[in-house]
């Protein structure tokens, strides 16, 4: 007979509520079949690219998962969100007390700073999860505005940053730390509209799954996914960025990982423009002639920024064909695209580049960095082309 402990371990984080097991799905169940796992303790997984571009809204089962520790097991009845720091009214908020705030809904794309990381290995090995191009997804998020909670807390004038801490437990430096992030106070105090950060409790009109931060996470539109902290347990208002490892000594662009390199580099906030080909798959066998492509493009995470064009080349950049945008255009969201290009026996790879209204563009090459962050050079898809007939 399976024990309760064994069931918890197998589930990867079923929620204990009132002493009984709450049947919230995790990626260790049927949805695990939908993703490519890079690790399972903790869960780090991305979808097949062909699945990723089936719809503008990414189904939860096809949404990438990024975790730094096993999913924490959280009792929703005992859960409390601590709000403290440079505020006049510190508090511990239960899920019930949070429900008194106005509910908001927004659609936003999350992308890992390490999306496309594996491409850097051609110039030198990089550490971290070896993401291909699927560490990205676009979802509907529901929750309360972070600004509403901060306004009730009465933020002090000297506040400059807001820290987030998760309830996960990460082994680091011989101790245990939570995953943390922080954002500038100006971003945190945006109270409404697409740019407003949320304390999200739902994803795609369903409660968050444990893999996506149940019962509460931050959602920071326009910023890398690391700033949208899962399993949120603590908010601290401060006059400086968080000292948490994942702000002070990670998620930075560095050539070396010496202390001075970390100290001289600032935290990554906004993501840059990026795009990828999702079909056909890499090394697909094609015949000469017209080939149909599909993919995604995400403009730079600036307010009001939109995609201006996506271009594809089948001859090493000598000629470029414009792609057609598909689906809705919305702030802080990706767009899907399709295109038709002619390939020849000389075509060894297909290239994609894009530009946006903020002046963001995908360069031919991105300088190598030790952590493999923000890879947004021209996307290069290797193919094998045979003559028709």
Image (spheres, rainbow, N blue to C red):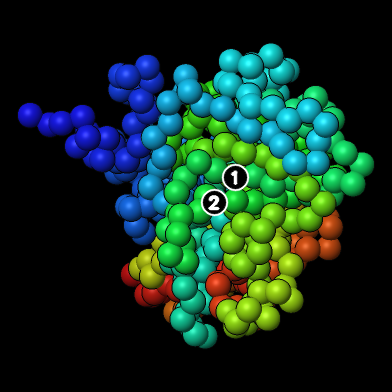
Look at the picture and state if 265 lies above or below 206.
Answer: below
Indicate the quadrant containing the C terminus: top left, top right, bottom left or bottom right.
bottom left
Query: In the rendered image, which residue does mark 1 sit on?
Result: 165
Q: Are marks 2 and 1 in contact (CB under 8 Å)?
A: yes
* Along the viewing direction, whichever of 327 and 203 lies nearer the viewer: 203
- Secondary structure state at the residue bearing disc 1: strand
The extreme left residue here reads: 1
* Along the viewing direction, whichever of 374 and 85 lies nearer the viewer: 85
Residue 25's image quarter? top left
The extreme bottom residue here reads: 123
**Residue 363 drawn at (x, y percent):** 70, 74
At 54% across and 61% down in the image, what residue appears? 115
Look at the picture and state if 134 lies above or below 5.
Answer: below
* Along the viewing direction, whichever of 1 and 369 lies nearer the viewer: 1
Residue 315's image quarter? bottom right
At 69% across and 47% down in the image, what residue appears? 163
Q: Earlier in the sequence, mark 2 or mark 1?
A: 1
For disc 2, the neighbor class at 10 Å (few under 14, some 14 to 19, many from 20) is many
Indicate the quadrant containing the N terminus: top left, top right, bottom left or bottom right.
top left
Query: In the rendered image, which residue does mark 2 sit on?
Result: 179
Residue 4 visible to an observer of this rendering: yes
At 38% across and 47% down in the image, what residue appears? 70
């Amino acid at each position: 007979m399976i024990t309760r402990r064994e069931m918890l371990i197998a589930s990867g984080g079923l929620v204990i509520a009132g002493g009984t097991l709450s049947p919230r799905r995790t990626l260790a169940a049927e949805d695990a079949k939908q993703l490519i796992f890079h690790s399972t303790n903790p869960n780090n997984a991305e979808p097949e690219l062909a699945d990723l571009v089936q719809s503008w809204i990414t189904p939860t089962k096809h949404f990438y998962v990024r975790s730094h520790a096993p999913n924490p097991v959280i009792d929703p009845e005992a859960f409390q969100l601590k709000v403290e720091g440079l505020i006049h009214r510190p508090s511990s908020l239960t899920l019930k007390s949070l429900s008194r705030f106005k509910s908001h809904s927004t659609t936003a794309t999350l992308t890992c700073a390490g999306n496309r990381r594996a491409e850097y290995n051609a110039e030198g090995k990089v550490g971290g999860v070896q993401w291909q191009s699927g560490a990205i997804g676009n979802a509907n998020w529901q929750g309360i505005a972070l600004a509403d909670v901060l306004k009730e807390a009465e933020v002090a004038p000297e506040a400059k940053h807001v820290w987030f801490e998760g309830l996960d437990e990460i082994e680091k430096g011989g101790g245990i730390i939570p995953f943390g992030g922080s954002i500038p106070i100006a971003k945190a105090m945006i109270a409404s509209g697409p740019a407003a950060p949320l304390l999200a409790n739902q994803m795609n009109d369903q409660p968050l799954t444990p893999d996506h931060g149940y019962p509460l996470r931050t959602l920071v539109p326009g910023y890398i996914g690391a700033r949208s902290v899962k399993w949120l347990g603590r908010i601290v208002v401060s006059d400086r960025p968080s000292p948490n490892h994942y702000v002070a000594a990670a998620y930075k662009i560095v050539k070396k990982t010496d202390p001075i390199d970390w100290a001289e580099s600032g935290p990554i906030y906004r993501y840059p423009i990026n795009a990828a080909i999702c079909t056909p798959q890499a090394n697909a066998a094609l015949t000469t002639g017209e080939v149909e492509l599909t993919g995604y493009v995400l403009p730079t995470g600036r307010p009001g920024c939109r995609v201006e064009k996506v271009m594809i080349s089948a001859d090493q950049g000598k000629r470029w064909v414009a792609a057609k945008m598909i689906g809705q255009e919305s702030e802080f969201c990706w767009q899907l695209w399709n295109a038709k290009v002619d390939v020849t026996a000389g075509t060894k790879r297909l290239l994609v580049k894009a530009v946006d209204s903020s002046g963001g563009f995908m360069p031919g090459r991105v300088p190598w960095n030790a952590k493999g962050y923000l890879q947004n050079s021209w996307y290069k898809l290797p193919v094998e082309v045979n003559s028709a007939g």
